[in-house]
Image (cartoon, rainbow, N blue to C red):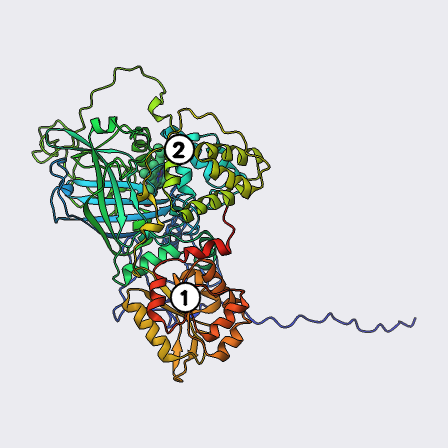
Amino acid sequence: MTSKKTAPRKSPTPPAAAPRRDRSALPRGNGGETQQQAGGGHPVMTTAQGIALADNQNSLRPTARGPTLLEDFILREKITHFDHERIPERIVHARGSAAHGYFELTKSLAKFTTARLLTEKGVRTPVFTRFSTVAGGAGSVDTPRDVRGFAVKFYTQQGNWDLVGNNIPVFFIQDAMKFPDLVHAVKMEPDRGWPQAGSAHDTFWDFVSLMPESMHMIMWAMSDRTIPRSLRMIEGFGVHSFRLLDAEGKSTFAKFHWRPKLGIQSTVWDEAVKLQAADNDFHRRDLWEAIDAGDFPEWEFAVQLFTEAEAEAFPFDHLDPTKLVPEELVPLQVIGRMVLDRNPDNLFAETEQVAFCPANIVPGIDFSNDPLLQGRLFSYLDTQLSRLGGPNFHQIPINAPKCPFANHQRDGHMQMDVPKGRVAYEPSSLDPESPRASRADGFRHFAEAADDGRKGRLRPASFADHYSQARMFLHSQSAPEQAHMASALVFELSKVGTAHVREAIVGHLRNIDEELAQRVADGLGLAALPPAPEPAAPVVDLPLSPALRIIDRMKDTLQGRCIGILVADGSDAAGLAALAKAAKKAGAQVKVVAPKLSIRLSDGKPFDADGQLAGTPSALFDAVASVLSLEAAEALKDEAAAVDWFRDAFGHLKAIAACQGTRMILKAGGIKPDAGVVDPKEIDAFLALAKTRQWKREPKLRTLA
Ligand code: HDE
């Protein structure tokens, strides 16, 4: 039998020879040459227990490619700490910016109070002040239409006093019972998670449409106060009436006010919207940079003082937090100033961990019965217990008083102190140094006569007028401000999908002012005015309060303002230098913008701009100028970023210094120069215009409701 010779079977292609794994560890695995090591000024890195680290690059393994060992206490400590780097954010006022500074008393209130910070003229009390938006989360933007928090912690020699206020003197609701509802309504809607930081949505307007007491605050929220230019340019208000108590326990009511030295200034709405894209941190950066540059923000501290008998004669109840006491009725007395002169060293340790609480009060000051304030006295400590992880957060450096403090509170999460001795109680006889109460120095409450009424869930009849002060506020505004309020209402309500909610709000507006209601109805395209709800109390015409305006009260100054100058290759170096010098001399900040960061001016020298054109829109500036060669302007007139730069500046009512070349860009943007547009050589005229906005321009370029 012949056997068939079978072809030798082809063996499959062998896999490419695998390189033998190098099972050894790289030398850097245990402190090799690529590791940064201590020495030469670099201290030794340690664990939180103080154990020095040899290697901050590699976790512990049995072999180079083996699993990580549970034994690696250094890795576990590092990751555990990292895992817990975030704490729950504040349910409201989550996004904040803060600074250290001092309060200096310039006029003593010794006649009215025993609080030493209000009686010792010239004494400087350290403060930490935090500004915030209300609705957005900690990572949201700085410039939504929103109320701003204005919270000041005074570290006085008699303990901490927190004046936790807002930049608006009234509030949405009259009773703390409604606060969770208000906040649930305004914050992002719980099913969909938006909007992140604004009130222009159905649930907010649904709630307020059913709460007529919110109408006065709505007028403020729709005014330019809620779109501030800078945190350095907002007012602050304690909102509630407080009491000042003298040594005999006699009480005088007090309302607290902060007035910015730079005056109040706001953005225009379209600008605020664009700023959200241009710079999410617009306010935070502005505050930081001003302090960093030694340009310390400052506020006057003023009080309105009135007696119980005077309050009885007011045409409103001052215990109702939806009402303000007009300056024209009770004048403001300036008694001090606050200067913020130091940025925080660490945002988390200070700005995040600071715990403000309206219940932190010093002897000589007391609360009023404002039902909103009464509820706040409970809420803040309660929320901070969970936000800051336990009852010892007063020991965190930013919260600790700067005067001696002692009591028998012990233990709990995160106890930082090591209290000594056997005695943690009172009365006691064992420790002569254990703390005791003091009749002479201790806090005393106003001995208010108790009402002989009946207990119940009550709302005073004197809180019933929801519209008269709303009307007073509206009519006290200048014409452009009233137009802005109407436009803001149209904008916000246009984002509300539910027709009956939009109509209900317009109905309320009729109780405030028929013309305003009509403007808003027209802006929304309503066929007819909806019915107005029956007011719970007659709407009356109160005396106007021009002190509530912004526009007419803006300070005639360039301090705190920033001028943007657009240049490009070949721009006149001398012209730029002259303009920048004059603007700085007049107090303004100057930033130069160019199509590229590094350019050459007419003198042939290299020049570094502060910002690149597409990334530095004109919304960031208070006035703009440009010094461009004709060739550069010729090229830029077809460049959207350049055309938008001027179109926005014009639309945001800013002064423009436009050279001959720039006029081509203006033309390309369809801009018809008006009296607010001058030549960059007319430096004085330009700087005078830059101090304000060109309000007359507005009706010509924007349909105001
Ligand atoms: Fe607040 N508010 N609030 N609030 N509030 C908080 O406290 C609350 C109200 C204000 O920069 C919370 O620690 C209730 C009026 C500011 O840290 C919380 C009521 C005014 C800040 C709280 C009000 C304010 C807060 C959230 C109605 C102006 C930020 C986190 C009864 C006078 C402070 C926290 C900072 C913060 C409760 C109304 C100002 C939940 C229950 C009116 C500036 O406790």
Q: Which residue is mark 1?
A: 624
Q: Alpha carbon of mark 1 to alpha carbon of mark 2: how far?
A: 43 Å
Please report the residue visible at 25 percent of the width from the left and 69 percent of the height from the top: 41
For the residue carrying disc 2, how many other residues have a C-alpha within 10 Å: few (<14), some (14-19), or many (20+)?
Answer: some
Identity, as a three-letter code, of the amino acid under mark 2:
Phe
Q: Can you give x and y, in whole percent of width and height, for residue 72 in the image?
A: 39, 54
Q: Can you give x and y, in whole percent of width and height, for residue 490 in the image?
A: 51, 43
The image quadrant where one finds ligand 1 is top left
Identity, as a three-letter code, of the amino acid under mark 1:
Val
In this view of the protein, which residue sits in the foreground, 508 or 569?
Answer: 508
Mark 2 close to ligand 1, CB under 8 Å:
yes
Q: Which quarter of the figure has residue 587? A: bottom left
Please report the residue visible at 47 percent of the width from the left and 72 percent of the height from the top: 662
Q: Are marks 1 and 2 in contact (CB under 8 Å)?
A: no
Q: Can you give x and y, in whole percent of width and height, for residue 501 in the image?
A: 53, 34
Q: Is residue 340 left or right of residue 225?
A: left
Residue, far left: 432
